[in-house]
Image (tube, rainbow, N blue to C red):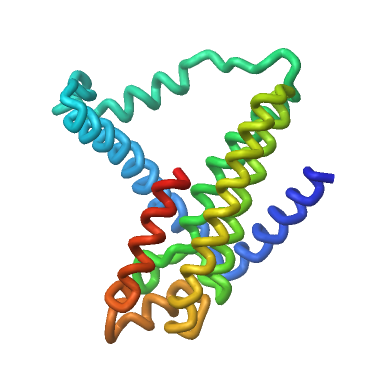
Amino acid sequence: MFLIIFIIKLAIIFILCCFDCDWFKFLPIILPVILSIAFLTVYERKVLSAMQRRRGPNVIGLFGFLQAFADGVKLILKETIIPSSSNYIIFLLAPILIFTLSLFGWALIPFSNNVVIVDIDLGVIMVLAISSLSVYGVIMSGWASNSKYALFGALRSSAQMISYEVSIGLLIMPVILLSNTTNLTGIVYAQKEMYHAFPFFYIIYIVFYLYIGRN
């Protein structure tokens, strides 16, 4: 029953996002996103090492910034360890699902006037729906491992993710009311006269704090 509900939700989101979609624009957008995340991770490690007065990644490449590629190669070449008593199909599907959903949300973000892969009227609702589906990946990984400790950890993480989703959804409501639309492109156009960052600075601060705590 759990998998049937998840598959139905995923199918509905996929069908809705296929309307007015130009998938040829997906690759030029998603590759810079993946590379920026990799280099930002290296930058975060260097900042944390400087704060803790220790050496960070400084060997591979200039100032160690090619450490991201070395970590990617190491991750690909590492041995895949699957618990013997686990449901290995769902156990392998869970991280793939989380990674795919995290990239799928970028298809709804408008980068410029004509650069948006999926432009639908319920863009904000769709972003929240896609991000909330990551909860299924966490629960699937904990349940498929066939360990009660992993299941307890997955339930705790999923409860935390759901609580943050509720808070973020409520904080986005003033932006929707001020823009009078849930279309992400329309929200951008609604800020021609004044950025929403000025009247809603406290909301931006709270959302930033919530996402730090969530991740």
Query: Which of the 4 image quarters holds residue 70?
Result: top left
Which quadrant is home to the N terminus? top right
Closer to the camera in the image, 5 or 214: 214
Which quadrant is home to the C terminus? top left
Image side of residue 215 versus residue 2, left or right: left
User: Which percent across, then down, holds residue 120?
Assistant: 55, 72
Closer to the camera in the image, 86 or 78: 86
Instruction: Note whether 176 is above or below 68 in the view shown.
Output: below
User: Which percent across, then down, holds residue 58?
Assistant: 18, 22
Instruction: Note whether 185 is above or below 93 in the view shown.
Output: below
Instruction: Note whether 84 is above or below 73 in the view shown.
Output: above
Image side of residue 53 versus residue 156, left or right: left
Closer to the camera in the image, 172 or 8: 172
- Identify the residue shown where x is 69% and y is 53%: 10
Closer to the camera in the image, 18 or 2: 2
- Identify the residue shown where x is 58% and y is 40%: 157
Query: Which of the 4 image quarters holds residue 198?
Result: bottom left
- Identify the residue shown where x is 57% and y is 73%: 122
- Identify the residue shown where x is 68% and y is 62%: 15
User: Which percent across, then down, holds residue 82?
Assistant: 64, 17
User: Which percent across, then down, holds residue 34?
Assistant: 39, 42
